[in-house]
Every structure is written in C-alpha cells, then in structure tokens.
Amino acid sequence: MKRNRIVRKLAGAAGVFGLLALLWSLAAVAHAQQSAGSVTGIVTDASGSVIPGANVTVRNIDQGTSWVTQTTSAGLYNFPVLPVGRVDVKVSAPGFATEVRNPFTLVLNQVARVDFHLKVGNVKQTVTVTDIPPLLQTGSTELGTLI
C-alpha cells in the first residue's frame, strides 16, 4: 500500500515534469517562428566615399511603422529584425540630397541589401564676419613709426 502511494507520486511528478518539458519546447519553437527579415547596406557619396552619421529610415507601408538608425563611421547601417511586408528605405545627410528607394516586399528571412549613392544637395550657408582684422600694408617692406 505504501509502495503504491510512492509509485503514484513518482508517476505524478514525472507527468508534471513531462508537461513542463513539452511546454518549454513548444515555446522555443513558437519563438523561432518569427515573421521577420532584415535590411542592411552602405551609404556613400558620388565619389564612393562613405558617409558616416547619415539618417536611415525604414518604413513598413502595410503597418505604418518606422525604424530609424544612423550609419556607422564606415557608412554601414543595419536593421536586423523587421516585420515582413512592403517597406521603403530613405536616407538623408547634411549637405546631400535625400534619397528614397521604391517600396519593395521584404519576405521571411530575407536580408535585403539596399546601398545608397547620395548626390550633393543644395547647401545654403551664410558666414558673417563680426570682427575686422588689423590692417597690414603688404605692398611694401618699409618699416615705419607714427608719432
């Protein structure tokens, strides 16, 4: 009789352990089945030099959500996990024209490589000098003193 109780307790504990193991494995499978892709690329200027600090925006057209990052010192950007769907990519940097890629469909597990070659944009810069430098006479090597 005592032995039967021990066997039932062990069987119950094994059942609970088995159920927990099953739930844990199902959670791992469900987590692995994300519907995501990624977008990566490099941003350069017309001469091929990289542009660090450029703002890169990926917008999911279907969901209306956006993600923003900046390029690294090597001109690289990366969006490692994005939901699948129609997306467009936009890049802007000071002194350069903003460029937007036509929307494309990002599919499951795709690593979309989208490189940009930015053109120099309209730069409006005003320099105002508020201090006058001392006047020098550069037309003659003559030394003089005013008393």
Image (cartoon, helix red, strand yellow):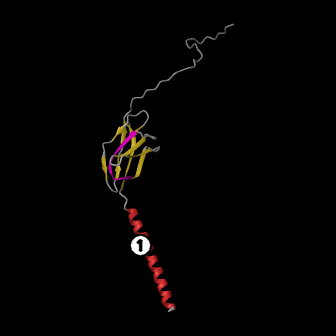
**Snapshot quadrant of residue 117:** top left
Which residue is outermost to the top? 147
Location of the C terminus (image quadrant): top right
Residue 49 coordinates in the image, percent (x, y): 41, 39
Q: Nearer the viewer, residue 49 or 128?
A: 128
Task: Give neighbour class at mark 1: few <14, some 14-19, many 20+ (Cα, 10 Å).
Answer: few
Q: In the image, 16: left or right of 37?
A: right
Residue at point 40%, 62% (across, down): 31
**Snapshot quadrant of residue 22:** bottom left
86 within the magenta span: yes
Which residue is outermost to the right? 147
Circle 1: element type: helix
The secondary structure that most of the magenta stretch takes on is strand
Residue 24 coordinates in the image, percent (x, y): 43, 69
Q: Nearer the viewer, residue 141 or 24?
A: 24
Tell me which amino acid carries mark 1. Leu
Magenta stretch bounds: 82-91
Q: In the image, 140: left or right of 67?
A: right
Residue 44 coordinates in the image, percent (x, y): 39, 40
In this rendering, the answer to whether 90 lies above or below 82 is above
Tally the marks.
1
In this rendering, the answer to whether 62 lies above or below 146 is below
Which residue is outermost to the bottom? 1
Residue at point 46%, 83% (across, down): 11
Residue 132 coordinates in the image, percent (x, y): 57, 17
Q: Which residue is mark 1?
A: 22
Q: Nearer the viewer, residue 93 or 17?
A: 17
Residue at point 50%, 87% (across, down): 6
103 within the magenta span: no
Residue at point 46%, 80% (across, down): 14
